Amino acid sequence: MAILELRVNKLRTFLSLLGITIGIFCIIAVLTATNSLEKNVRNEVESLGSDVIYIQKWPWDGGPDFPWWKFVNRPLPKFQELEPIKEKVHSAGLSAFAFSASGKRVEYKDDYMEGTELFAVSGDYEKIQAMKFVSGRFFAGKENENGSNVAILGANIWEGLFGTPEKALGKTIAIAGRPCRVIGTLKKKGASLVDGINYDNSVVVPYLYGRTIVDERRFADPFLIIKAAPGATLLQLKDELRGVMRSMHRLRPKEEDDFSLNEITAVSGDLNKMFGMVNLGGGFIAFFALVVGGFGIANIMFVTVKERTNIIGLKKAIGARKKVILMEFLLESIILCLMGGLLGLFFVYVITAIVNSFDFFEFTLTLSNVILGLSISSIVGVIAGFIPAYLASRLDPVVAIRSN
């Protein structure tokens, strides 16, 4: 009977669905957006390595009150510091040196790309920060040791110059006028949500060759990257690195460090605070949207009870019990809300498909959010429909039949 009444009053049903659809769409869209953003940011942060220390000139804990003047005169990390670290830091497993320089021109025959990133790395870098290849390989041992003129292309570069990754392999390109043979092509990663190297727009070369193109001491931001050995803790690695670096820099006991030991755990703590605030704000927005939808359903149900008062009286006169009348209107409210919830979820799914067609970040409608949306729809249906249904079940049959 509840479904039949909904089919008879199509316009009213549509208007009721519209309110709850917008409410569910808002709450699930907000949750999906914040969850997807958090997931992608955390994945990118974790890809930097949870057991890795970055030795850099600048610390990562920036902010509006960042005392940049304390760090601006610090020395830059040097490639020569890599060997002493390997020898003296026993908790270090793998170590590498790298630098990046932006604004480089990459050419192939008559085609070229401006504003690309030159990324020079030493031998063990790929073992610490795994690169995802479409075709080809990373640099071999001799290529690293000899500073061979070989290169690995990011997705934007091989797409722009060659169209397909296979066509790029073996070709000779020019980086800032210097020739390189392409030996590998990387998978497309998409836009980065955290600071770091944008591999899509990078040409990766061996460090000893990269330094012949760019002087990293003047035009780049070099860093050392150290991965903890199996069984070694990050705290142990950090303590050993601090001692070795202070010794190499000849710092006195009372002097402050003139280098930064950056780690991912510091960023993760900031992320917890940030996403806690984002989820709280998103929850408020979604809650108010849902309240509006719930009031719309309750209003429609009061009108429905008013219109069918004499029918309710007839049903009660021929023996319908209070719980039957209660369940009829309550089910009508719940079905309305569930249908609105399904429509809201469908629109969220459409939005996820549209967003995922662009190279921004992965937007995922999870099963937990689907279940949450349907559960909220049912709860709103019960809350919004209970009072009108209860009043309908309590009507006096004689009075109800005589009503107009």
Image (spheres, grey):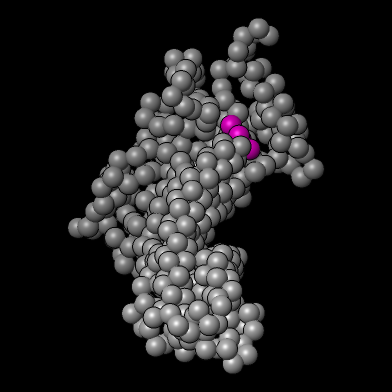
Compare residues 238 and 141 and report the one nearer the observer: 238
Instruction: Tell me: 381 left or right of 10.
Output: right
Q: Residue 103: x and y, percent?
A: 30, 40
Above or below residue 254? Residue 62 is: below
Q: Residue 133: x and y, percent?
A: 50, 61
Residue at the far bottom in the pictured view: 318
Instruction: State the image quarter where residue 250 is shown.
Output: top right
Quarter of the figure with the C terminus: bottom left
Above or below residue 68? Residue 261 is: below
Would you say residue 300 is visible in this rendering? Answer: yes
Residue 191 is covered by the magenta coloring: no
Query: Which span is picked out in magenta?
Result: 262-266
Instruction: State the image quarter where residue 155 is shown.
Output: bottom left
Residue at the far left in the pictured view: 110
Residue at horizontal 53 percent and vertical 48 percent from the top: 279
Marks counted in the figure total: 0
Residue at the far right in the pictured view: 231
Residue at horizontal 58 percent and vertical 71 percent from the top: 390
Instruction: Tell me: 175 left or right of 62.
Output: left
Residue at horizontal 39 percent and vertical 49 percent from the top: 202
Above or below residue 70? Residue 284 is: below
Residue at horizontal 52 percent and vertical 70 percent from the top: 388
Would you say residue 150 is visible in this rendering? Answer: no
The kind of secondary structure the magenta stretch mainly shows is helix
Instruction: State the image quarter where residue 373 is shown.
Output: bottom right
Compare residues 199 and 299 and report the one nearer the observer: 299
Compare residues 158 and 57 and report the one nearer the observer: 57
Q: Residue 146: x and y, percent?
A: 50, 43
